[in-house]
Image: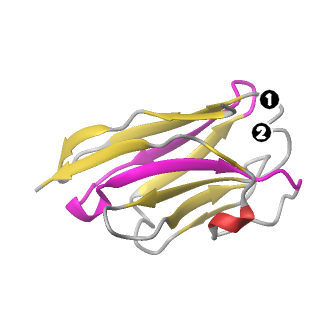
Amino acid sequence: VQLQAYGGGLVQAGGSLRLSCAASRRTFRSGAVGWFRQAPGKEREFVTGITWKGGRTYYANSVKGRFTISRDNAKNTVNLQMNSLKPEDTAIYYCAARRTPSEVVIPTTTRGYDYWGQGTLVTVSS
């Protein structure tokens, strides 16, 4: 396993959670890292992504202004701070890493990533 996502749990609507994605240095060496989520019965969808040096980020409209992605390359981790959570944010959250180096490209589809973590469950109660 090259990526590991953790930090999920149960939270009330309006609350916050912080997810983290840890990886070997080789996995995070140069490419973008993204977070996706998959709710029951739905397809996996893009949430947010960040480039290797953190100079560029991109957010899905549904989370813009509530979620913040950041990375600590010294610790080989990418974090996702989720605030003002809503019941519709309930899903399994996955982190993914892209092998191709770039400070511009942040893929928004699953095919754009080469490595995947096992997912962590986030449940938001109303």
Circles 2 and 1 in contact, beta carbons < 8 Å = yes
* Residue 87 found in image quarter: bottom left
On the image, the x and y values in percent for residue 59 come to: 54, 66
On the image, the x and y values in percent for residue 45 come to: 49, 68
- Amino acid type assigned to the residue bearing label 1 in the image: Arg
The residue stretch that appears in magenta = 73-101
Who's the residue at 56% across and 60% down the image? Answer: 48
Q: Is residue 103 magenta?
A: no
Relative side of 105 to 125, left or right: right
Who's the residue at 40% across and 33% down the image? Answer: 7
- Amino acid type assigned to the residue bearing label 2 in the image: Phe
Who's the residue at 34% across and 62% down the image? Answer: 39
* Residue 34 found in image quarter: bottom right
Please give the label number shown on residue 33.
none
Query: Is the residue 40 above or below the residue 70 in the image?
Result: below
On the image, the x and y values in percent for residue 112 come to: 73, 65
Numbered circles on residues, count = 2
Residue of label 1: 25
